[in-house]
Amino acid sequence: MTTLLSTLSDHLATVRQMLRLPVAHLFFDEAIAPVNVRSTYRYYTKRHPRYKIIQHKSWGAALIDLQRFNNRNDYFDSIKGRNWGAQHIKRARTRGYRLAEIERNDYVDAIFDINTSVEARQGRAMDQTYLEKQQCFDKLVNFRYYGVLSPDNRLVAYANVGHYGNFHAFERLIGYRNNDGIMHLLVGDITAGLIDQGLAHYLMYDTYFGALPGLRQFKTMLGFTPYRALYHLR
């Protein structure tokens, strides 16, 4: 009975938090890449798989408001503190890791090795799409492809980032498990680069409340906060 009441209390706390979320208007611009932008808009706005009355990625979208920051240094200052993102990013830099834009077809084997380096992540078995080796990658016009390279130029993490309108979104984000801060470097430097470019209002990293505690903490320490996202197609 105590466990049930505790669970109900947690759910009610989550509902109250969701009702207080700030609202972000996210615009999909078909002119950027008509086919991909339309299909992504349909995916984001379809019915939620569990809560049918809401859209798939509406309540609790994990966003960074990029326009809050004048430059990358402002962003890094916002994630300083003990065990926050900037600390892990600094560790990765000190150990010789760096972010680069990559041509994925130059890293076919490395990407497959990363995808299959563990059997489960965040308590879930790896999806079949990660377990099948892709021999050739298409390059979408509205995407940028990033990797973290080790001191010996080995790919240790990668991310695909889509540009859809007034926001960018991570489409895939994965790397080796280690304690060097490579994933923090990957997300942090991509965020800083988008701030410097000034092309978008928001950066999205999936949703907030659906993430397990470890992933939710990771998003928080890099500056992502939950929003209610309202989607528009133009």
Image (tube, rainbow, N blue to C red):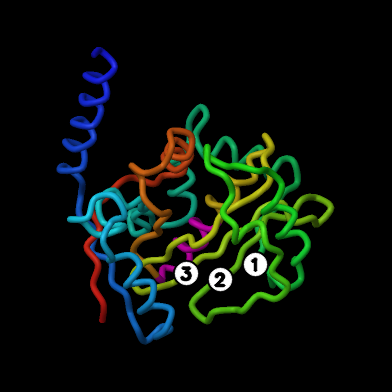
Task: Reply above or below: 8 against 66.
Answer: above
Residue 40 found in image quarter: bottom left
Q: Find residue 133 and report its horizontal and vertical position in percent.
A: 71, 64
Q: Amino acid at mark 3?
A: Gly
Q: Residue at x 36, y 50 (%)?
A: 207
Q: Amino acid at mark 1?
A: Glu
Q: Main secondary structure of the magenta part?
A: helix
Task: Reply above or below: 3 against 19.
Answer: above
Q: At numbered mark 2, what does the secondary structure look like: helix, strand or loop? A: strand
Label 3 to label 1, Cα distance in Å?
13 Å
Residue 216 found in image quarter: top left
Label 1 to label 2, Cα distance in Å?
7 Å
Task: Reply above or below: 60 against 165.
Answer: above
Contact between labelled residues 2 and 1, with CB atoms less than 8 Å apart: yes
Is 179 or 73 nearer to us in this picture? 179
- Read off the residue under disc 2: 144
- Residue 197 covered by magenta stretch: yes
Q: Which mark is residue 3?
A: none
Q: Find residue 58 and report its horizontal and vertical position in percent.
A: 26, 56
Image quarter where the N terminus lies is top left
Q: Amino acid at mark 2?
A: Arg
Say whether residue 110 is left or right of residue 47: right
- Read off the residue under disc 1: 101
Q: Which mark is residue 162?
A: 3
| Other residues around mark 2 within 10 Å, as few (<14) / some (14–19) / many (≥20) | some
| Other residues around mark 3 within 10 Å, as few (<14) / some (14–19) / many (≥20) | many
Image quarter where the C terminus lies is bottom left
Extreme residue toward the front, this view: 1
Q: At numbered mark 1, what does the secondary structure look like: helix, strand or loop? A: strand
What range is drawn magenta here?
190-199
- Residue 161 covered by magenta stretch: no
